[in-house]
Image: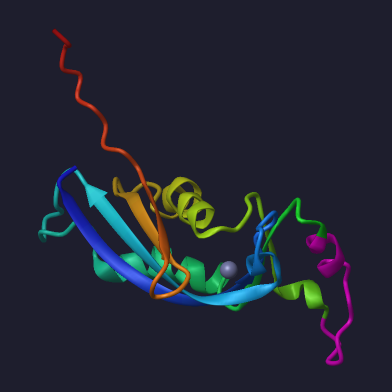
Amino acid sequence: MSWQAKRYHDISCGHRVVGHEGKCRHLHGHNYRVHFTCEADELDNVGRVIDFSDMKSKLCMWLEENWDHKMLLWEHDPVANVLTDKIKTGDGTTLDDGIVLVPFNPTAENIAQHLVLVVGPQQLKGTGIKLTYCEVEETRKCSAVYALRPKKNNSRQM
Ligand SMILES: [Zn+2]
């Protein structure tokens, strides 16, 4: 795949990293910037990998609807049991409304991998376009990347 289209989106999320040696084990949050790269074998009739507005509606809006202003917790995190225990808050809602249980310890690396391996294929199904690369910035100084490796061609080894 030669063509790439890129778009980023900003969300705010809470999380904590289970097993972290320092302060990241505490409940805290980040203003995440998530960079998506889509690839296609061929451009469409207009000359695009994917319309940028489709990247927005399929990928950025997924973040907006599922993770923005929510608390991402690993499903095996003992804290998750406490916070999802239907605690009534003053306004009659329950605290667990904003808790998202994820099947991974929510480091930037694991978030990027989940977006490439699970969310991308689900959101881009049927389009022929792949989300091949995702960079998750926790701060403007620190980020992690997950990228699909390009398939090796079947050249015979001599
Ligand atoms: Zn953090």
The image quarter in which residue 41 lies: top left
The residue at the point 47 percent across, 49 percent down is 113
Q: x and y percent of residue 109 in the render?
A: 49, 54
The image quarter in which residue 8 lies: bottom left
Q: x and y percent of residue 31 in the render?
A: 50, 78
Residue most extreme to the top: 158
Please tell me how many numbered marks the rendered image carries: 0
Q: Name the colour scheme.
A: rainbow
Is residue 138 placed above or below 158 in the rendered structure?
Answer: below
Is residue 12 placed above or below 50 in the rendered structure?
Answer: below
Can you say which quadrant of the picture contains the C terminus? top left
Residue most extreme to the front: 21
The residue at the point 65 percent across, 64 percent down is 22
The image quarter in which residue 21 lies: bottom right
Q: x and y percent of residue 102 in the render?
A: 65, 55
Q: x and y percent of residue 147 in the render?
A: 35, 47
- The reply to whether the magenta stretch includes residue 89 is yes
Looking at the rendering, the stretch of residues picked out in magenta corresponds to 79-93
Can you say which quadrant of the picture contains the N terminus? top left
The residue at the point 26 percent across, 68 percent down is 52
The main secondary structure of the magenta stretch is loop
Is residue 105 placed above or below 73 in the rendered structure?
Answer: above
Is 153 or 50 nearer to us in this picture? Answer: 153
Looking at the image, residue 8 sits to the left or right of residue 80; the answer is: left
The residue at the point 41 percent across, 63 percent down is 143
Classify the position of ligand 1 by quadrant: top left, top right, bottom left or bottom right: bottom right
- The reply to whether the magenta stretch includes residue 50 is no
Is 46 or 141 nearer to us in this picture? Answer: 141
Looking at the image, residue 76 sits to the left or right of residue 69; the answer is: right
